[in-house]
Amino acid sequence: MRNRTDSPPRARLTLEHLEARDTPAFVVQIDYSLDALGFFADPTRRAVLERAVNDVAANLSANLPALTPGNGNTWDATFFNPATGREVRVSNRTIPANTIVLYAGGRDLVGAEAGLGGYGGYAAGGSQAWFDLIRSRGPGFTLWGGALAFDTAGTNWYFGTSAAGIGRSQVDFYSVAAHEFGHALGLGTAPTWTSQVRNGAFVGPQASALYGGPVPLAGTSHWADGISVGGQVVALDPTATLGGRVTFSALDYAALRDVGWNASAAAPPPAAPSPPPFVPVPLNNPRTAPAPVVLTGPADGTGRAYTLSADGFLRPAGDAVPAFPGYAGVTRGVAADFTGDGVEDLAFGTGPGAAAGVRIVNGATGADVASGVVLDGFGGGVFLAAADVDRDGRAELAVSADAGGGTRVSVYKVTGGRLVPLADFLAFGDPGFRGGSRVAMADMNRDGAAELIVGAGLGGGPRVAVYDGAALARGQAARLVPDFFALDPALRSGVYVAAADLDGDGRGDVIYSTGVTGGPRVRVVSGALLIANPGADMAALPALADFFTWDSRDRKGLRVAARDLDGDGKAELIAASADPANPFVRVIPLGQLGNPTGPLQNPLGTGVTLDGVYPG
């Protein structure tokens, strides 16, 4: 939740001792043992947190069996450490029936974030009955509890008991605590929430009936900024109101019922005119010109830009371009505006068997923009990514070595017909690994400078590193978050990466797929969530999507790209097969993440490729 200046709401609350009538329908235990910075050393803060949580819990009920390990049955609770953001495991904790546990603490959160909340994951061993007990514990998704973290640095908190004392420039801790508790209960985070998100709106029947139609979202985890029902402000707003208190609204409770809770909502708001019909236009992401995607793979070494037609198929946006005249080997490409004229240019890189080279072709004129030998002419092939790193409105080019070349990555500024080195380094800090790496770029922290995402190549685990774009512009390779494993660390097929804003929240999301020999699995992680949980196990955090793009038995590999093909401000996922004999592609928009239904298509129009299809 971020800070926002707004007129104060009218909701008032005083803190008092919980009487019998206030006893929650289920028990929430707050555990402060991981509050290493002492944010909750003041008992007043604890009291406000516990009151905020219990005020919501008092309206909920669920049948949660006790978790009592023993007799060969074990389990680990996994969650982000509220004091560090890193994953932590607590083994064999006993949790009574109808009880959840929330670990609470404080740390310096990124940017304007005031709080962060979510439910935890688990690992278990033992009997099938034990597995079933844990898996089925929850209101529709597995729930033992989770974690809440609150900002210790940049937030001007109000910890008072009465809303009347909130200063105009203060953030009410009670309001933020209730909001983050909602995330721990599954709002914006649980599979039962994400399965009801369509075209930028939440379509749960209870919430939709109350609102009068699908409820607009900011991204995929919050109501659209400023949403209200009958004049009642909502708790699941993406930003925290300065100078006022916000409690859970009827709409928030309706959403809890939609995700599986038994919720006796607060009194409904007074009758109000029906809201205008919802039009799925992305918030804060105005419609832009559709972007092309570059596909390479034909045996003649050409590449071509494609755009999305109304029928969902990719159509050629121009002639095929010889990536390197006289060269008929594997090529990889990417589209970006290197000249600043508003037209996407095409950049190509050589594949294995040729000296590492790059050529950039002007998208408007077909003339060469720049070309040259890269990575000292390494012969194992290169991967490309492009985006604006130095905030000048023109894309920079990132180049990484394929298998055999180690993890060297170079970032170039394209100027005066030349490739001018901006940064050059070994990703992961591992000079011994020779499996190469793959690259992607997108602005994840909304500072205007695109981050560089690097995925390990063949023979390595699915390790991913994220480098800060602003630092790259200064020639420095500084990690934005600690490295993490995108998928099972035991995998050795490498990982393909892509990055773009898929959910319309203005931050680049990270997309990764299994590499060569892996199944066609794609996992998408919110860039905002990744940044807010530095060092966390990605498997323990909720994903925007985690699914197979086609037959799960396919072991030819999968490559991914993400481009805003329809100009709606949210990128589409482009999945491409690495099978040389089956060069098919699938375009997957936000509404189909997790359940793609678009056609498997062959835009190249050929039955055989050199090395499958490369999208960029």
Image (cartoon, rainbow, N blue to C red):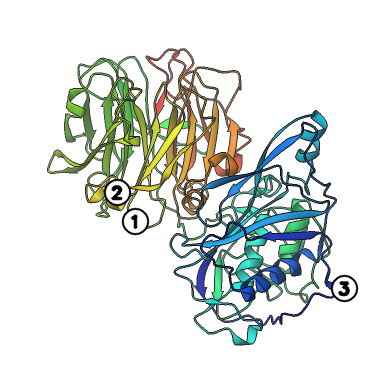
Mark 1 in CB contact with mark 2 (< 8 angstroms): yes
Q: Between tags 3 and 1, which lies in front?
A: 3
Q: Determine the secondary structure under disc 1.
A: loop
| Distance in Å between CA atoms under marks 3 and 1 | 51 Å
Gap in Å between the C-alphas at discs 1 and 2? 8 Å
Q: Neighbour class for label 2 at 10 Å: few (<14), some, many (≥20)?
A: many
| Residue holding disc 2 | 388
Marking on residue 448: 1
Q: Residue 384's spot in the image, x, y percent?
A: 31, 33
Amino acid type at circle 3 is Arg
| Three-letter code, disc 2 | Asp
| Mark 3 lies on residue | 21
- Residue 281 position in % (x across, y down): 54, 56
- Which percent across, then down, holds residue 293? 39, 35
Find the residue positioned furthest to the right.
Answer: 21
Residue 607 figure quarter? top left
Q: Quadrant of the N terminus?
A: bottom right
Q: Secondary structure at mark 2?
A: loop
- State the image quarter where residue 208 is shown: bottom right
Contact flag, marks 3 and 1 (Cβ < 8 Å): no
The CA span between labels 3 and 2 is 58 Å
- Residue 211 in view: no
Q: Is residue 354 visible?
A: yes
The answer to whether the residue labelled 3 contacts the one labelled 2, judged by CB atoms less than 8 Å apart, is no
Return the disc, 3 or 1, that comes first in the chain's sequence. 3
Query: Does residue 410 sit above or below 152 in this rendering?
Result: above
Q: Earlier in the sequence, mark 1 or mark 2?
A: 2
Q: Which mark is residue 306?
A: none
Q: Is residue 549 left or right of residue 121?
A: left
